[in-house]
Structure formats: structure tokens, C-alpha cells
Amino acid sequence: MLLTYLCMIAWDSLQARLKINNVIGSSDQDQKKLKMLNSLVGAVSFNHIENKKKLISAGIYSDFIAKTYYLFKLVPLGLMLILIFIFYLSSTIDLMWAVVYSVFSVLIILIGPDAYISMRGKKITKRISGRLPFLLDLMNVCVHTGMTIESSLDYLSREISTVDENLGYVVYKTVERSKVVGIEKAIDEFHQMVPTSEAQSFAMTLKQSLQYGSSIGPVLSSLASDIREINIMDLEEKIGKLGAKMSIPLIVFIMIPIVVLIAAPGILRMISDA
């Protein structure tokens, strides 16, 4: 993890210096370094597009990590397995412990990052979905000032990043894609990046307004209120389940000690009388 972090910092600093040198000139040396680094990274890059989608859903937007994702998993795993094999040959550990350590290495190094990214992706997707009412209210204000849907998304993609980086990135990518494939296709891709029912309602509302030219301001306000009500209902449902979840700790940590305290004196008297 530390090596990945250091490599990512080096990659970002090289790209930043290259952009600065492109403005002030004399960037040939950095261009060669970046080209060489790209060739080295490209040689060990596997399934780059799919990795990038998973990392973006988890809030990790570095292209360097997407390209070297499998590299930073397979290299530590290979080193760990070689180390275990050396310890086994030197009779430091027996065969059973070598197998146990190998299985744990595979679980932690190979499967662990995927599980973490999947869990983090679900959490961020849920958080973005919960922040959609905030985006809808801001879009409603922009539309009432005379801005179009495209211009309001373009403006909010820059401003909303100060409040929520993940939501700002999703809106920014939607705006960038709209310049290439059109706004309707970009809205569909927004729903693909945030696969929730709230995002689907948001996408359908925007597409309906674009297709039929209907007034979108009141619809955005109504949709924001509906999503807030759904979030409140989900919170109330979690609070309702809290009582059932607390019953097991209540039995284990309170009821059982009380039973022991009540029964212990009688049991001690029976033992002493015997």
C-alpha cells in the first residue's frame, strides 16, 4: 500500500510538472519520462477499462492505480508465496502452516482489495444517491434563472465538488460525455455510474424534459422532496430494526449475568451443604 501511494504521488507530480512545462516551454525531458513510464505501465496493465470503472465507483480516480491495479496485487502475492516456500524448504514451518499462510496471503492480498473496493463502491453509490436532492434543488434554482439543463450541469459540476467530491466527479463526467455522445446518452451513463432508483428517476426526468420540452423546474422540486421522503423512510426502517438487533447483546451481556447472580448463592449453599 505504501509503495502504491508513493508511485501514485510520483505519477501525479510528473503529470503536473508536464502540464506546467507545456505552458512555460522546455518539456521534452518530461515528455520522454512520461512516455517511458506509460510504456512500462502499459506492459503490466490488465483489464484497464474494467478496473477503472470499479475504482471510479469506489471514489478512486487515479488512472495510474487503474493501470497498475493487478501489478500491486500480484507482485506482493508472489513475493509472499516465495517467502513461504523458502521458510518451508528451510524447515522453519511445516507443510500445514505453509498451506495456511498461503491461503491467508491469497485472501488478504488477492481477494481483500476487491472486497474493499466493492464495499466502498456500494457505500459511495448510496451516498451519491442520498445527495441527489441537493443537486436537484440547485438545478431547480439554475433553471429558474434561465439556464438550460446542459449549462446548469456544467456550472454545478464545478461548484458542487467543494461540497461532495464524488457527486461532483459524476456530474463532471456526465457533462464531458455530453459533449461527445450527446446529453441523453450522457444521462443514461450517469445512471450506469449511479445504479439506484433515485438516479434512474433523475435520468428519466431530464430525458423527458429534453424530449418533450416540458417545464422541468417543478418536477425537479417534487423529485427532490420524494427522494428525501424515501431517505427518511429508510432511516425510520433502520431505527425500527435497531430494537431487534439490540436484543442479542441484551441477552448475552445483561440477562445471563443476572441469572448467574441469582442462581450462584443457591448453588454455593448446595455445594457447601454437600
Image (cartoon, rainbow, N blue to C red):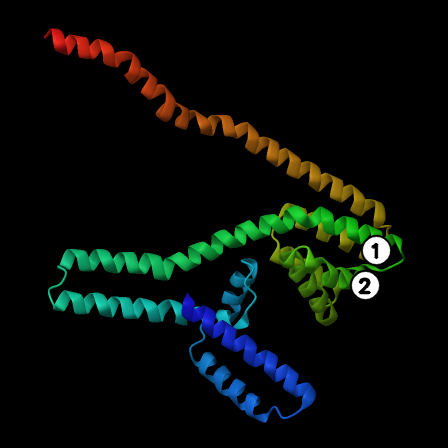
Say whether disc 1 or disc 2 marks the residue closer to the N-terminus. 1
Which mark identifies residue 151? Answer: 2
Residue nearer the viewer, 260 or 79: 260
* Residue 213 in view here: no
Q: Is residue 74 visible?
A: yes
Residue at the spot x=67%, y=50% of the render? 199
Q: Are marks 1 and 2 in contact (CB under 8 Å)?
A: yes
Give the label on residue 142, or none: 1
Image: 221 above or below 163: above
Quadrant of residue 40 in the image? bottom left
Quarter of the image with the C terminus is top left
Three-letter amino acid code at disc 1? Answer: Cys
113 horizontally vs 145: left or right:
left
Q: Quadrant of the N terminus?
A: bottom left
Figure label count: 2
Q: Position of residue 116 (x, y in %)?
A: 45, 55
